[in-house]
């Protein structure tokens, strides 16, 4: 991979990282900064119905799982940026063959070529 392509992928990764951080911030702001009562819009002194509480808990857990998944993406992006510095970006971590540009354009922080990714997914239950 030439220097120009590496620079372009670096810009893509930095932009994606910025977008994901913004998304995490929005999720946590909406989820963690409000009490359950505020989140539901019910500010009365009456207690919640159990079904409402369960629904609110599900929504909070779902949002926090999204934030956790996004954090994993940030780690993957940081690792890809480090591989750019190390001049190993674009090589499969499993077989050391080049990852196709088409795959890297789709998932700029990909660590495996298509073949190794398929093998990995077929092993996962």
Image (cartoon, rainbow, N blue to C red):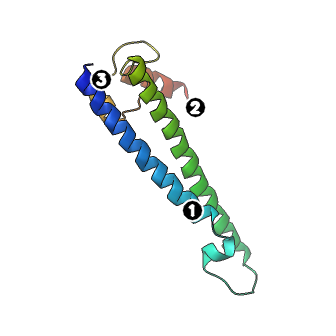
Classify mark 1: residues with Cα within 10 Å, few (<14), some (14-19) or many (20+).
few
Viewer-nearest of discs 1 and 2: 1
Give the residue displayed 61% in from the left and 73% down from the top. 39
Residue 70 drawn at (x, y percent): 51, 45
Residue 109 drawn at (x, y percent): 41, 32
Classify mark 2: residues with Cα within 10 Å, few (<14), some (14-19) or many (20+).
few
In the foreground, 45 or 29: 29
Q: Earlier in the sequence, mark 2 or mark 3?
A: 3
Q: For the residues labelled 1 and 2, say whether their Cβ atoms are less than 8 Å apart.
A: no
Give the residue displayed 27% in from the left and 19% down from the top. 1
Residue 35 drawn at (x, y percent): 68, 70
In the foreground, 6 or 35: 6
Q: CA distance from mark 2 to mark 3?
A: 26 Å
Q: For the residues labelled 3 and 1, say whether their Cβ atoms are less than 8 Å apart.
A: no
Classify mark 3: residues with Cα within 10 Å, few (<14), some (14-19) or many (20+).
some
Q: Secondary structure at mark 2?
A: loop
From this view, report whether residue 53 is shown above or below residue 47: above
Q: What residue is pinned by disc 1?
A: 29
Q: CA distance from mark 3 to mark 1?
A: 38 Å
Q: What residue is pinned by disc 3?
A: 100
Q: CA distance from mark 1 to mark 2?
A: 34 Å
40 with respect to 49 (left or right): left
Q: Secondary structure at mark 3?
A: loop
Residue 71 drawn at (x, y percent): 54, 43
Residue 69 is labelled as: none
Q: What residue is pinned by disc 2?
A: 125
Q: Quadrant of residue 83?
A: top left
């Amino acid at each position: 991979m030439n220097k120009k392509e590496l620079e372009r992928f670096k810009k893509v990764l930095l932009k994606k990282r910025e977008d994901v951080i913004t998304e995490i911030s929005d999720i946590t702001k909406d989820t963690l900064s409000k009490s359950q009562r505020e989140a539901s819009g019910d500010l009365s002194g009456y207690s919640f119905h159990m079904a409402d509480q369960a629904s609110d808990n599900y929504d909070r857990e779902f949002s926090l799982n999204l934030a956790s998944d996004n954090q994993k993406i940030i780690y993957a992006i940081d690792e890809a940026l480090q591989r750019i510095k190390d001049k190993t970006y674009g090589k499969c971590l499993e077989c050391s063959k080049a990852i196709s540009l088409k795959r890297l354009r789709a998932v700029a922080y990909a660590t495996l070529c298509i073949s190794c990714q398929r093998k990995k997914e077929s092993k996962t239950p």
